Amino acid sequence: MKKFHPFLLSLLSGVLLFAAWPPSPLTFLIFIAFVPLLWLEQQGLRRRKFFGWVYLTMFIWNTATTWWIWNASVPGAIGAVLANSLLMCLPWIGFHFLKARLGPKVGYPALVALWLTFEYIHLQDWGLSWPWLTLGNVFAGHPGWVQWYSFTGTSGGGLWILVVNILVFRLLAQAPLKPLPKAPILRLIAAILAPLLLSSLFFITPIDSQITTTLGKASPNVVIVQPNIDPYEKIYTGSFEAQIHKLIRLSDSAIDDRTELVVWPETALFMENGISEANMKANYFLHPLWDFLRRHPRINLLTGVESYRTYNGRQNNTARRIPNTDLYVDSYNAAVILDSSGPLQFYHKSKLVPGVETLPAFLHFLDAWFEKFGGTTAGYTGQADRTPLSSSNHSYIIAPAVCYESIYGEFMSNYVRNGANLIAVITNDGWWGNTPGYHQHEAYARLRAIETRRWIVRSANTGVSCIIDPSGTIIEDRPWDQAAVIKRSVKPEQALTFYVNYGDMISRLAILATLLLTIWLPVQIIKKKKGRG
């Protein structure tokens, strides 16, 4: 094979990964984005040098696609780019090691298994979970390509990408042969086209719920509010009264006699010291909210709230002591569903942003540095269960996703398995400003719609708010940086997909393959040593 300078191959791979990523329209480049790295590995570099060049690729990819985190958190951005780039190298180092000892017939399948295993682990709660760049997310702008995510989830997309990249590389490696063998060409064509054909078979065209009826009557509607309140002003100016009146005014402009659910964004209810969950009804500053709900006794309100609970004595491991008292407190980035009688149910955000909302115990030596740049060390308390929030008449049973929780596939599908018939994303993407971040975040929600075949209502403080149908199609949205409302009938869905019922089977198979490799490798090494002896 022709040799190229490692820097050129590393740079090219990083640039291709960035160029393919949403909101770029060049998604097809993902099918060749890893080819330069595979070419690099074939050049026989030592492990340390190979690691260094792979790290450069991953650093370019992470920096170019998620640089906007800097606008919200300096330590969060630095930590996400450096740590994520390092973690993404691990499957490649394992591949390099295994291929050198067991040959390409084991090495290339091992790369697929190792990468999918890494992604699955990275989706779990281990302290530094940041799966924004999960490979299968790249198709978020093209839901028509991946309707089979209702069976596989995003790991199916990762498998597709890795297999095609390996087949392209293997074909290029045979390019000096004339004529080229037909078999590898046909395998590559089949690998690209078969998933697209499957997607066309699985594509669903839901009946627009705007025209459906229930018992001969017009179906109920949902009102989504996008208040467009500057998140930094929200925190520092103490303008809570003006903010809540704006939310109410926008809601009133759209509510009619068929409205059953109103959705406000993340931390729509925010006060400097938080809001007590036990005393919401008695909170003087929330009187306009209760007046609003009494005027509309038929509706439920789903809203974000910065909340807390206090205890006499320490009742759990997450509570922090209030100085000079015997009281302990848990703080939450929460969602609550309310009606005119008061709070019905709370949900406490569980997927906390590393370095922004929480810091794992093994990084507490960085406490002072994180706090200096606006990060957090104590953070919020989450909840372990995936209990949906039910409206008072049980017509909508809601899977709540606060902030960036909608990027976690199995996490959201667990709500649906527990009875959710609607997904509600409440978020505040304004921290990032007018950057690719909010485009990516909105697009990823489309994949959750496909995986669960649920309608999604999305309320984002500064945008983009939207409604997504079960095929991942954005039915209606509102532009960035505008105060707006959406009113539309949304149908509760009941059927469960294969992915909801059985979870991420592809990743589990990849984990099994990885475990078998770790057992088989030393056996093969011992056999080779005995053979030489």
Image (spheres, rainbow, N blue to C red):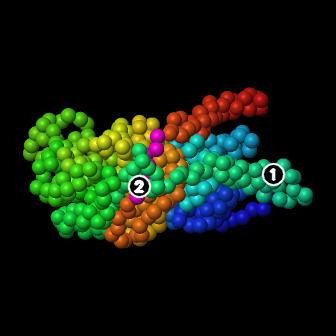
Secondary structure under tag 1 reads helix
In this picture, residue 409 sits left or right of residue 465 = right
Which of the pair 325/234 is nearer the observer? Answer: 234
Is 54 drawn above or below residue 112 in the view shown? below
Which is more N-terminal, label 1 or label 2?
1
Q: Position of residue 121 (x, y in %)?
A: 50, 42
Q: Is residue 235 visible?
A: no
| Residue 160 drawn in magenta | no
Three-letter code for the amino acid on which mark 1 is drawn: Leu
* Label 2 with label 1: CB-CB less than 8 Å: no
Few, some or many residues within 10 Å of mark 2 (<14, 14–19, 20+): many
* Residue shown at 12% from the left, 37% from the top: 312
Which of the pair 176/3 is nearer the observer? Answer: 176
Looking at the rendering, the stretch of residues picked out in magenta corresponds to 488-494
Residue that numbered label 1 is attached to: 186
* Residue shown at 52% from the left, 43% from the top: 120
Residue that numbered label 2 is attached to: 489
Disc nearest the viewer among 2 and 1: 2
